[in-house]
Amino acid sequence: MEDEDPVVQEIPVFLSQALSKHLYIYQYPVRPANRDWKDVKVKNASIKPKNQLVRLEIGLDTYSDKYCPSKGEQIAINTDGQQESSWHVKEKDRSQYFRNGIMDKIVYESSTPCVETQHYTVAILQDKELHCTSIQGVVQMRPSYSYYDKQDKRKHDKNKSNDSDDEEKDSEVQQITVKFARQETEVAKKAREKSFETMSHRLAEEPWYDAMWRHHDTDQAELERLKLFSATSSDGSALRLRGREYVRALVPPAEEDQAPDQIPSLQDQVREILINGEHMSIFYYAARSADLYPRAAHAPAALLCAARDHVLYLFTQHTYIDRRKVAAAVRLPPDEVLQIIRTVAKYNPQHGWELLIPPDLAFEAKYPEVMQRQNLHWEARQRLFNEMLIGESVPKRQRKKSQRESVSSDTMLSPKTRCNSVSEEDSDRKRHKNKSATGSGKRTRNISSSSAHDGT
């Protein structure tokens, strides 16, 4: 490789920061390339710094044999109207586009063809050294014919004044329509801010600021040009990276190929798996409702958490549940209840909603202490759910009494006896069958009655 592509010359590269925030490239796409700016007379220069607009007034040679004075005077009259002989009126001169009564200038205004300019630089090669300066932007200067707009505006104002005189003579009562602004969303607001009308209004609001124009052969221009050279000329090598690190900096890997900066703890990994997992057997390992609903959506987060805990509690007591009964108990919209149930259960057309994966009877028989703790946990969650519902339905002056009664109520807090989703006789037969199959292991899970037509 070294023989096929030898190094011809080594040139040191320097980076200058003196003009990095004030350097712009000016382009003139409609001006002939063979015409330079040595003999150009810039009468006035102005800028809009916020919108990065530049305006140059270039003087015309009105004494040239290629210039038509009569046509220039006619354009000035159409633009500014018939000028008075009192030329010393300064306030009126300021509003005139052509102050000398003749078209003696042409205006260039800028546009921004390129927005992403952070990868462009201007370089100067001198004394076998390359000095680079990053640019702030690129502007293209094109002739502006805004005086035609001023001519149309004069005609419109003149017609409007004539119409207003006629309206004063025949004044009538007019109906006024009152409109109220509608509250817009974030998407509509962003779209409105990017619209042409908003951008034009923003450009019109910023005033023009006068600027100083210096020709390239002046002392001030030469001082600014010297700032393109770097002040530091260190001979040390700027490349302090290894070959592999340098290639990695030039061609960064994709985001999916990069290793995470910080490996989460085991607890956070388990929590992430439980939150994103779709499989649900029984609640030996289940994500907490507070982790699934950290903030409110269509309903309050506290009510969503309580509803999910109630659904999980019902599955510890019943094999099948009825969605309509759950919706009536949790006081949530049917769509929210259906979404909660679908995360842990699937629909059985014959009986109702059941867990996604059947219970592991071997696990329950092997770890009875785990099942006992789980039952106590879900009974406590159900107790909080009952207290919350009772507290919402009873007035504040009787809340304390109703809470005390709810603690002593056996019907609201104690687990229900196991029942079947079809009939009580089938429940007795299944209970006898489960006892004969599991031996001495006793399950605390019961079955609730459900609807055979609960499809969605």
Image (cartoon, rainbow, N blue to C red):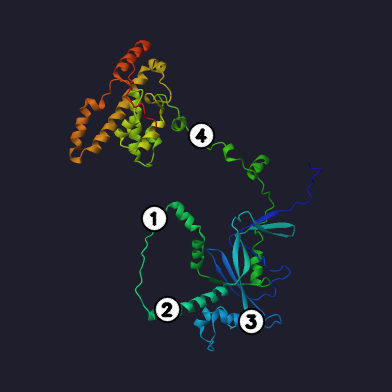
**Spatial distance from mark 2 to mark 3, Cα to Cα?**
33 Å
**Spatial distance from mark 3 to mark 4, Cα to Cα?**
78 Å
**Front: mark 3 or 4:** 3
Determine the secondary structure under disc 2: helix
Please tell me which residue lies in front, 374 or 125. 374
- The residue identified by callout 4 is 263
Q: Is residue 423 left or right of residue 127?
A: left
Q: Is residue 118 left or right of residue 191?
A: right
Identify the disc placed on residue 119: none
- The residue identified by callout 3 is 71
Locate residue 23, reporting x and y percent.
61, 62
Quadrant of the snapshot with the N terminus: top right
Please tell me which residue lies in front, 362 or 259. 362
Determine the secondary structure under disc 3: helix
Which is more N-terminal, label 1 or label 4?
1
Which is more N-terminal, label 4 or label 3?
3
- The residue identified by callout 2 is 164
Q: Amino acid at mark 2?
A: Ser
**Front: mark 4 or 1:** 1
Locate residue 444, reporting x and y percent.
32, 19
- The residue identified by callout 1 is 183
Determine the secondary structure under disc 4: loop
Q: Farthest residue toward the bottom?
A: 85
